[in-house]
Image (cartoon, helix red, strand yellow):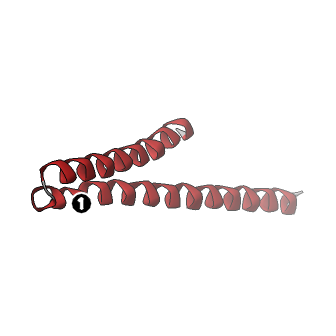
Amino acid sequence: MERYNQIMLYFWLLVGAFALIAVTYFGIIEGFDKWAYYYIFAVLAFLMFFMRRYMMRRMKKHMAYLEEQEKNAQSENK
């Protein structure tokens, strides 16, 4: 599951970068009045990247906390 999360993390980063570059390119070529609204897709992809990264770090800290609690519980039982 860790591998999948890492892949999806960078997937959203790539989607955001691609969307940002593509919308900027088409905005220059065809005019920003037509393409400016599509920046929302780049923003959403970057938000997904940062939210996923935040949640992965939070989960890693929580798992370390649970392991520490388990070690403490085992040492108290001995």
The correct choice, above or below, for 18 with respect to 63 in the image is: above
Give the quarter of the image for residue 3: top right
What residue does disc 1 label?
40
- The percent position of residue 10, horizontal first and vertical second, equals 47, 43
Observer-nearest of 39 and 7: 39
Question: Amino acid under label 1?
Answer: Ile
Task: Identify the residue shown where x is 46% and y is 59%.
Answer: 50
- Callout 1: SS: helix
Task: Identify the residue shown where x is 29% and y is 48%.
Answer: 19
Q: Quadrant of the C terminus?
A: bottom right
- The percent position of residue 5, horizontal first and vertical second, equals 49, 43
- Is 14 positioned to the left or the right of 56 in the image? left
Task: Identify the residue shown where x is 15% and y is 55%.
Answer: 35
Observer-nearest of 43 and 56: 43
Task: Identify the residue shown where x is 19% and y is 56%.
Answer: 38
Give the quarter of the image for residue 61: bottom right
